[in-house]
Image (cartoon, helix red, strand yellow):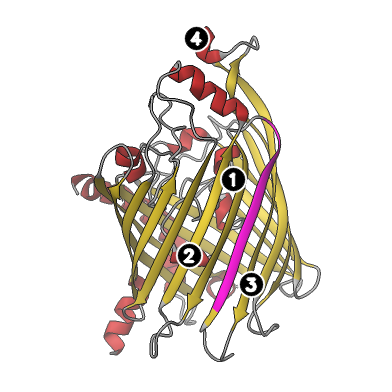
Amino acid sequence: MSRFVGSIPALAAAAGFAWAPAAQAQANPEAGAVAWIASYTGEAAANVSGGLRQGQDYAGQLVLGADVDLGRAAGLAGATLHVAAVDRHGRNLAQDSIGGGTSVQEVYGAENARLGRLTIEQSLFDGRVVVEGGRTVANLSFLSSPLCANFQINSACGTPIFAPRTSGFTMWPVSSWGGHVQGWLTPKVDVHAGAYEVNPSHGGNSDHGLDWSTSGATGVVAPFTLGYTTGSANGALPRTYEVGGWYDNSDYADPLRDAAGGLAAVSGKPYAVRDGRSGAFARFEQTVTRPDPASQRGLTLFGVAMTRTSGQPIEDRFLELGLVQRGTFAGRDGDTVGFVVNRQTFSAAALENLRLIRGGAGGSPPADETMMELSYGVQATRDIRVQPNLAYIVNPDPFTQPGQLRNAPNALVVGLRLDVNLADLTTHARTN
């Protein structure tokens, strides 16, 4: 708690710096120029069996920001300013107790206060082209989905874990320079491409998102997609189908060999520095039942398949399937039931490196990791959502703790997620 309180001045500094244009926009006599953002997500988790030991941890995320319509605020038609400051706090159960490298608390990571987003978005040609750039992250615009709000495990959300584990794909809230362009070929078909600075120096807890230099940058990651999307307005059953990939020219460590081609775990020399990795994916979200078009009730299926296409990352493939049923019992239209299962398949080079580090102790590391989660989301009020969940991990991976000499037992995790829309909560409280 003391670390969280101590971070408030930095959060205030980031928010105050970032919100200066927004505060001016709010003073504009034309209403509706500013949409305020304030939310809190808390995620508790305890492994009741399995892992290296039993334990419990909590991680939380506070987000404060605004979307400013610069057309209304400053006469810049089609332009929007996006601002968000973030404070993350807590501990990681996967690291502390389970012995795996993939978190069961998706808001864990970059545990401090920082500026997570400061971008200008411009809509062109009657909305057929959108351009955005500034301080941002790739997974705000690529490989993200609102369905993630129904889950807590980090292998599925906020972005399938394969992308950041096999490339420099930048993840919320560690912002760097970047931008993207999205264009609609038809009302349902779009092409989308972006480029983002890869700068590992920004990931530390001492970075608050206010260092905008490119010192420490190692390259650029460029995601791209071709998508087909329908919504409630142009399809009876909303859907998204998307194919795409990324190319990353940033530096990374070879998972097995040193610069001379020898086995780094044997030679004791540093792992070779490589550059150039790429991957491809296909994903879908398909609503399959929608009894009442005027209601949000319905069942949505989703899935993703991902593979490496070049380079030497620590994973070869990723597969995921899941479902979300919105609307459960009578009168519970906002409640949800969600289930997701995914599998990460590790590369032969990464597995061989672990075998060498272990030196024959503890047996061979597992070739893959499977994670699954079952959740029930209770929409307690318009602005408060409580979501108990159960997760099961088969073969927790040890890649973030290579010195771990034994395989961690499969783990059963009990979790609880809380989401509070603070911005609307105060408004609704005043109107009730």
- Residue that lies at the very extreme toward the front in this rendered image: 363
Instruction: Calculate the distance from the C-alpha at mark 3 to the C-alpha at mark 2.
Output: 15 Å
- Identify whether 64 is placed above or below 74: above
Q: CA distance from mark 2 to mark 4?
A: 44 Å
Name the residue at 39% across, 90% down: 330
Badge number at residue 286: 3
Say which residue appears at 35% left-offset and 61% top-offset: 41
Q: Nearer the viewer, residue 42 or 267?
A: 267
Q: Residues within 10 Å of mark 2 (few under 14, many from 20)?
A: many
Measure how far apart labels 4 and 1 are at the Cα level.
29 Å
Neighbour tally class for label 3: few under 14, some 14-19, many 20 plus, Cα within 10 Å: some
Front in this rendered view, residue 68 or 421: 421
Quadrant location of residue 424? bottom left
**Residue at horizontal 62%, vertical 56%?**
142
Q: Which residues are magenta?
A: 299-311
Q: Earlier in the sequence, mark 2 or mark 4?
A: 4
How many residues crowd mark 4 within 10 Å: few (<14), some (14–19), many (20+)? few
- The amino acid type, in three-letter code, at marker 1 is Ala
Amino acid type at circle 4 is Gly
The C terminus sits in image quarter: bottom left
Circle 4 SS class: loop
What residue does disc 1 label? 163
Please give the residue where the numbered disc 2 appears in the rendered image.
Answer: 339
Disc assigned to residue 268: 4
Disc 1 or 3, which lies upstream in sequence?
A: 1
Residue 91, x across and y down, in percent: 30, 45
Three-letter code for the amino acid on which mark 3 is drawn: Gln
Identity of the amino acid at label 2?
Phe
